[in-house]
Amino acid sequence: MTTTELLVADVLIEAASAGAVLADLSYASLSRVAAHAGRASPVDLAPHPELTAWQAYLLRESPDANLACIWARALNVDIAPSRALWMVEPCHFAIGLERVQLDDPEVLELSAEHADELAQLARPLLAEDGWQLVAATPRRWFIHRAEALDLRGCAIECASAQGVSDYLPRGARRDELAWRRTVNALQMTWHEHAVNLAREERRLAPINGLWLSGNGAPGPIALPYCEVSGAPPFPGGTTAAPEALRNIEITDAACVPMRNEDWYAYRAALARLDSRLAHYLAALSAGAIAALRITLTGRQSVRSFELTRRDLWKFWERGTLVDLLSEKV
């Protein structure tokens, strides 16, 4: 019998805000789980500045995993496995008085037609510097080359709604500067292009940059689970271990609301999580699964605890949603 793990991404909320956001909420399954929140313990992970906390947890046994390879496999992008690979995403940099902020890509509303026009403009500029571009979806593009570069970029989710200075691509000085020159050329080409003029007419933010993530390393990524599901399509880019005795489901419904501090949408995401937990708690009570491990992540931390069928009868344990969902760093 397998153990099931539910990985809830970006659901932990800053302790200072938790009381106000979670006030007056009543969810049967979450409350049942919160009763055992006292046994949750932090998960120590190797530093991985290019990934979000939930990605770092999922890939904890593959510390050099290339995020771009995972997404390319998930989206069925046909790139030779021997080529160095990065993911690049059309984005908007908001220029402020004190910092440059990266807008959340989920709210950009970039159409397939406009993305294709921008990609057509980008291809020859990238080719001049040895890159080949594959635009898999309007949002997710990939660049690859035969020779590797010392260039590592953070997942766009790390920097979304944040100042970008701490998250820009890092590596050998020569490779950093080369990439910046390429991006600058793209920005000049896209500036006041018909695509961005049309976006401005619709009061949408212009596309004025490319966000690079990944480290160039080729190769598939294996996870220590017999089955990986949820949060499509990211899990589809990994390989399962059929001999493992546990499976995992990833839910990311809280990610976008958390990044944008949209607490109405965050509370709605909790309602969906409560419904999913009801399914797992029923399976645990019926003996259909051996144990339920619940892993909760925030912007910086990861907490995890495990429930067995016997734990469901420990009525003396108490806890609140604030206990369960506050991020403790």
Image (spheres, grey):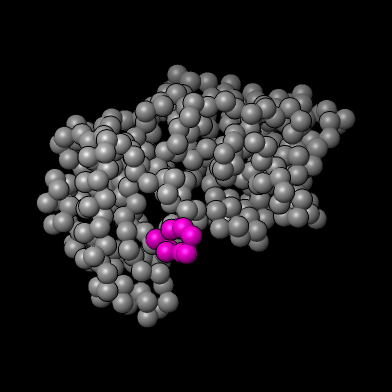
Residue 312 position in % (x across, y down):
77, 30
Compared with residue 181, is residue 227 higher up or lower down, i.e. above or below?
Answer: above
Residue 151 position in % (x across, y down):
29, 38
Q: Is residue 29 left or right of residue 263?
A: right
Q: Residue at x 79, y 42 (%)?
A: 320
Task: Give the quadrant of the N terminus.
Answer: top right
Q: Residue furthest front?
A: 98
Q: Residue at x 46, y 49 (%)?
A: 159
Q: Residue at x 15, y 36 (%)?
A: 146
Q: Residue at x 25, y 46 (%)?
A: 177
Q: Is residue 133 visible?
A: yes
Q: Nearer the viewer, residue 138 or 132?
A: 132
Task: Give the quadrant of the C terminus.
Answer: top right
Q: Residue furthest top?
A: 243
Q: How many marks?
A: 0
Compared with residue 239, is residue 107 higher up or lower down, i.e. above or below?
Answer: below
Q: Is residue 209 magenta?
A: no
Q: Residue furthest bottom?
A: 201
Compared with residue 207, is residue 81 higher up or lower down, i.e. above or below?
Answer: above
Q: Nearer the viewer, residue 318 or 123?
A: 123
Q: Is residue 29 visible?
A: no
What are the residue bounds of the magenta stretch? 93-101
Q: Is residue 224 left or right of residue 38?
A: left
Q: Is residue 37 left or right of residue 119?
A: right
Q: Quadrant of residue 150?
A: top left
Residue 17 position in % (x across, y down):
71, 51
Residue 283 position in % (x across, y down):
66, 33
Q: Nearer the viewer, residue 17 or 34?
A: 17
